[in-house]
Amino acid sequence: MIGQWIGVLGVAVALYILWQIRQILLLIFTAVVLATAANGFVRRVQQLNVPRGRAVLLTLSIFLTFAIIFIALIVPPFLAQFQELIQLLPTGIEKIWQSLPLWIDQILKWIPENLGAARETLLILQERLRSETLQIDLSRIDLSEVSQQASPIVGRFLDNFFALFNNAVTVTLQLLLVFILTLMLLADPQSYRQAFLALFPSFYRRRADRILTHCEIALGNWFAGIIINSLFVGTLSGVGLWFLGIDLALAHALLAGLLNFIPNIGPVLSVIFPLSVAIQTPSWRIWMVIVLYVVVQQVESYWLTPTVMARQVSLLPALTLIAQICFATLFGLLGLILALPLAVVAKVWIQELLVRDILDGWQP
């Protein structure tokens, strides 16, 4: 009896320790996912009679080249566009100010006549907007007054400087840890695989090795599926923006494809950049950009992703959404980003270990 209680206490302590280091475990899992994705390319290079070490270096060189090209296509145009946007910001605000009465006209058409108070309020607001003009001249801004108003903000910023610096250092170290772990796993994956299998009883290690193979295949299929989704989102976004005449359509398309790796948050972030460019154009383009991104994301979310994921990893759409909610609640933003690969691996282990090896052989 005492031995059973000691066993229960040991399991509880182990679970508590695992929960305390959950962020580190997520970083390790991130390295495993990246190493698994890169290992597929390494194996294809090895089929050309290239040694493992050279294949790894060649794969990393290819990935690094694509990353540099990607950054070169996105960062400089966006920096130039941002500077231009700052210069044209007063004009954009004035344009929005002038468009407000027209938007109120459209709203009034949808408000019933019996809502007299609401209509009267909008009419008064519309009259004031038409009678007053908004003129912004940055050269006339009193810098001393701005400095006085900004001093409390600067003070609060300086108070939190060390916290911000600490967070920046933490993120940098985490990225460095993931990069180093990925290189180590990619250089000699079999040794780490055998070390992990040693945690299982000797009679189950061969079976656990087969389950790990299933996990590797499932992660590869998931990565292929997310690449298909990103290409779809990037291509449709780029074609739509080019058709609408929005500047930097290629950069916006690449960014939309990249941010598509982040479920739910990525699509929202991707629309900010083309909107910042469209604000300098006629107002109808702003609405068309919003409509374009909504349509693309609806098609991707409700048709492409369920179809591709169901075929690539046999993951039901409802389970995909539940996994995103659960892992985001438990692990935060990193859990949301890794929700799908975590769900893929969890599905394999539940199906193979719990269902086939335990429940299917359960005797009443």
Image: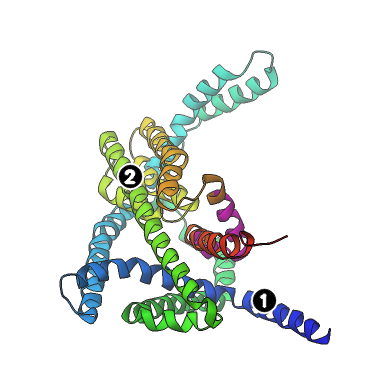
Which residue appears at 52% of the width and 30% of the height? Answer: 129
Give the residue type at disc 1. Leu
The residue carrying mark 1 is: 15
Give the residue type at disc 2. Phe
Left or right: 244 in relation to 211: left
Quarter holding residue 152: bottom right
Which residues fall within the magenta stretch? 321-338
Left or right: 141 in relation to 330: left
Distance, label 1 to label 2, CA atoms, is 41 Å
* Residue positioned most to the right: 1
Q: Position of residue 223 (x, y in %)?
A: 37, 58
Number of other residues with Cα within 10 Å of mark 1, as a class: few under 14, some 14 to 19, many 20 or more: few
Q: Report the predominant secondary structure element of the magenta stretch.
A: helix
The residue carrying mark 2 is: 232
Q: Quadrant of the N terminus?
A: bottom right
For mark 1, give the secondary structure.
helix
Left or right: 289 in relation to 134: left
